[in-house]
Image (spheres, coloured by chain):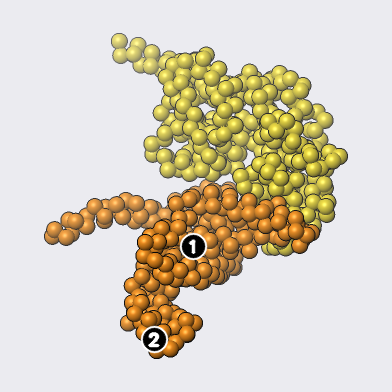
Amino acid sequence: MNAALLLLPAVLILAAGFLYPVALLGRISLNRTSDIGAMEPDLTLATFEKVVGDDFTWELAWNTATLAAGSALAATALALPVVLLIRAAPPRWRGLLSLMAIAPLLVSGTARIVGWLAILGDQGLINAALEGLGLATEPLRLINNLTGVRIGLTESLMPYACLVLIAGLGRLDPRLEEAAATLGATRTKTFLRVTLPLAAPALLAAFLLTFVLGVSAFITPRLMGGGRVFVIATEIFDLALETVDWPAAAALAMLLLGALAVALVLRTALTRSARA
Amino acid sequence: MRRSAILAAFTALGIAAAAPALAQGGQMTLQAYAGIFRDNYTEVVVNPFTARSGTQVQYFDGGTSAQMLGRLRAQKADPQTDVVIMDVTTAAVACAEGLVERIDASTLPVIGQLGEMAREAGGACGPAVTYDHLVMVYDTRAVQPAPTRWAAMWDPAQRGRVAVSAPPNIQGLALTAILAKAASGDWRNINAAMPRLRELAPNVQTFTPNPDGYTLILNDQVRFATGWNARAQLYSDQSQGRIGVVLPEEGTAFQINTINVVANAKNRAQALAFVAHALSAEAQKAFTERMFYGPTNPNAQVSQAALNRTALAPQFRERIVGVNWDEMVRLRESWNQRWRREVIAASGR
């Protein structure tokens, strides 16, 4: 009884801040949209049928999944050496280094993207340097396309991957690596045969977390894609705020939510089996 | 006694309906665009209204028209705003959903003074309050001589230096209609516009200029962009002419903002009085001269200098492509898909 009471505030906050808006979204998705865009109250699955039956929705799903998977993979791979370095550092430096690794989370996503625009833009830092050194006559197209979105998304996901890996690798017993070295294993062999297998559950958890975040990413594809990168989140934005087709936006959002729920269930199952 | 009380009540109601401009004092909330629109509209339209009527106007930054529509939907049972200024396509949705009042010259006599297009723009609901139009903006330092045609954006020398807002943004829809009209005589004929848009695609750096094309020009990111005349004229002045504004020879299309009284507004009398003021010749003249939106009240005696910076100047009127936005809304989804598959996909960046 007491435990249930203790849970009550969290349940109420969850109900007010998540369940109610999701229920409202679900209700809107069952309405209809007239040909001029007016929302007509209804209880129909017609909008879901339209959204699911549209080839473009599947193209969006593919774009979203591949972009998120690629960026999550890159973020996890790039975070691993950073975390290994933190782990190998003297204990008194680890706190500071960990803070530095996740410091980008302290800066707004939009501000970070403005920074990327200055670095990757056609007249940005990289292109100015290349042209200045005589290495390029035409600017490299590093932004307002898929390349830019991949770079921006990978960078924005890296701190999350670092957080998961710091927690996961922090639990590894360093004596196992020392034992491998004592038995004559080189540093590379120790890493490949001891550290990496032991880090696998943390790597998987980092990948799955960043994948889920990548699937729902909006700001980076919107601001760095130049209108060329179509993912589900940008489509929901366009439907809600450009064409004001709320039922279609809500239906797409519900489908995305369902897909993310499936991904989270898979993540839990995979993490459990990896631990086992 | 009872009969006289009823008579007095009906008389009071009759006065309120026939002469909303007589409303004095009280307060009301206006929901409209933020930024420079707010600053200038407050100064030349809202403040004079307050001074004359004693009504305090709270200006609520509504964001985009779609965001304003969202707020009207969310507050349908308990509206928190009384008057809303929004784009004509979004206002049509609000009107169809009963979120704004049906209104005509019998309720507001000033509506009878407006031009035909202004009256028809809002359908059964509020009329047009401003006209704006699509323009080409360019960097006057980098582009010389001054261009006069949309075709300047197609110049191969401008590869990667053009920003175009693609559909579903209405700038992209308007540009498509203008090119279709120029190529075939019919703004609806997207097939006529597509070849030209595909040719333009390689020059386009971004199809979603952020925060807008004017800023990208000032930051040396692009040399050409599509824009709306009123803001472009203001940014041109603020940048000491760095941003050039062209109403291209191939044509332009109007973007129309309508003004509406919110359904079940808490301060309806003040709202009607404000709408009457906003549509008056005096307020229309003041706002056109301040921000170069075209006046919807033909009685507004706008200075020639200001009029020349709108599409309503005699020398520009023939360039206006008569886009019917009700029809455009129905075409929007198919045009959007064709842009994605045939234009953006061809941009090869």
**Which residue sits furthest left?**
A1
Image disc number at residue A157: 1
User: At 46% across and 21% down in the image, what residue appears?
Assistant: B56
Instruction: Return the x and y of residue A173 as percentages of the image width and height.
Output: 33, 77
User: At 74% across and 40% down in the image, what residue appears?
Assistant: B137
Amino acid type at mark 2 = Thr
Instruction: Return the x and y of residue B61 as percentages of the image width and height.
Output: 50, 35
Can the viewer see residue B127?
no
Asked if the residue under mark 2 is in contact with the one under mark 1, i.e. CB atoms within 8 Å, the reply is no
User: At 66% across and 54% down in the image, what residue appears?
Assistant: A125
Is label 2 in a helix, a strand or a loop?
helix
Q: Quadrant of residue B341?
A: bottom right
- Where is the C terminus of chain A found, in terms of image quarters? bottom left
Which chain is yellow in the picture?
Answer: B
Q: Chain of mark 2?
A: A
Pick whichever, B266 or A241, lies toward us: A241
Q: Which residue is mark 2?
A: A182
Q: Chain of mark 1?
A: A
- Horizontally, residue A167 falls left or right of residue B276, namely left
- Chain A hue? orange
Can the viewer see residue B73?
yes
- Horizontally, residue B172 falls left or right of residue A198, namely right
User: At 66% across and 60% down in the image, what residue appears?
Assistant: A142
In the image, is residue A53 above or below residue A137? below
Graded by Cα atoms within 10 Å as few (under 14), some (14 to 19) or many (20 or more), the crowding at tag 1 reads many
Instruction: Return the x and y of residue B175 as percentages of the image width and height.
Output: 73, 47
- Horizontally, residue A29 falls left or right of residue B312, namely left
